[in-house]
Image: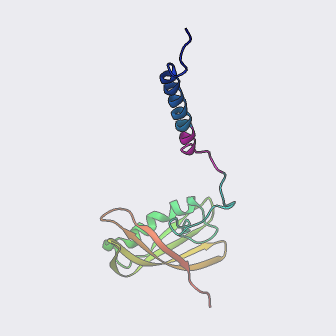
Amino acid sequence: MGRNLGEGNGLVRTCGLILALSTLGLTAAGCSMSFPLPPLMADVETTGSITPALAPLGPGSTNADWDAARPALEDALDPAHEGKTASWRNPASGLSGHFVAEGEAFVQDDRLCRKYRAEVATEGTSRAMTGTACRVGAGPWAVREARAEAQG
């Protein structure tokens, strides 16, 4: 005799439930997918967290000039050489100069610091500079501030 329409409903309901839950799961998973987006701003934003490189000898000086001058700065700032003028020269560029410590050492941001005066010269021109260098413990001195003195 004929089958009753209600006999196979359990299997149909189970398959329908699995299909509905699978569709719902795939749809929900699509919400968690991400795609790379192009930047919203064309230019890179500059913040104060990265400071520009300091030119300890002023504009126009090179890394080679600084390599020649650094030992003289170390010498001038050494407390054992109080008041000594320490000279330097880079024969390759013609730049030369000298450093002398100014005043007593002081503590700033847990570093030992000293102010200094410098003279930087090249082919008939010279510029006077002042700056501050600091170090941690017995480590090397690092220039924290350098600026040309006003002419006049």
The location of residue 34, given as percent across then percent down, is 58, 45
The location of residue 24, given as percent across then percent down, is 54, 38
Camera-side residue: 108 or 39?
Answer: 39
What residue is rendered at 65% in x and 77% in y? 125
Q: Is residue 28 magenta?
A: yes
Camera-side residue: 2 or 80?
Answer: 2
Does residue 143 appear left or right of residue 139 in this picture? right
Residue farthest to the front, as pictured? 1
Task: Give the total of numbered labels.
Answer: 0
Tell me the quadrant of the picture where the C terminus can be found: bottom right
Q: Quadrant of residue 84?
A: bottom left
What residue is rendered at 32% in x and 71% in y? 110
Residue farthest to the right, as pictured? 42
The segment highlighted magenta reads 27-37
Q: Is residue 53 magenta?
A: no
Q: Is residue 25 above or below residue 100?
A: above
Q: Is residue 140 above or below residue 105?
A: above
Q: Is residue 88 above or below residue 126?
A: above
What residue is rendered at 49% in x and 19% in y? 7
Camera-side residue: 55 or 121?
Answer: 55
The location of residue 117, given as percent across then percent down, is 48, 79
Q: Quadrant of residue 39?
A: bottom right
Does residue 132 appear left or right of residue 24 in this picture? left
Camera-side residue: 117 or 148?
Answer: 148
The location of residue 130, given as percent across then percent down, is 50, 80
What residue is rendered at 56% in x and 83% in y? 149
Does residue 24 appear left or right of residue 75 in this picture? right
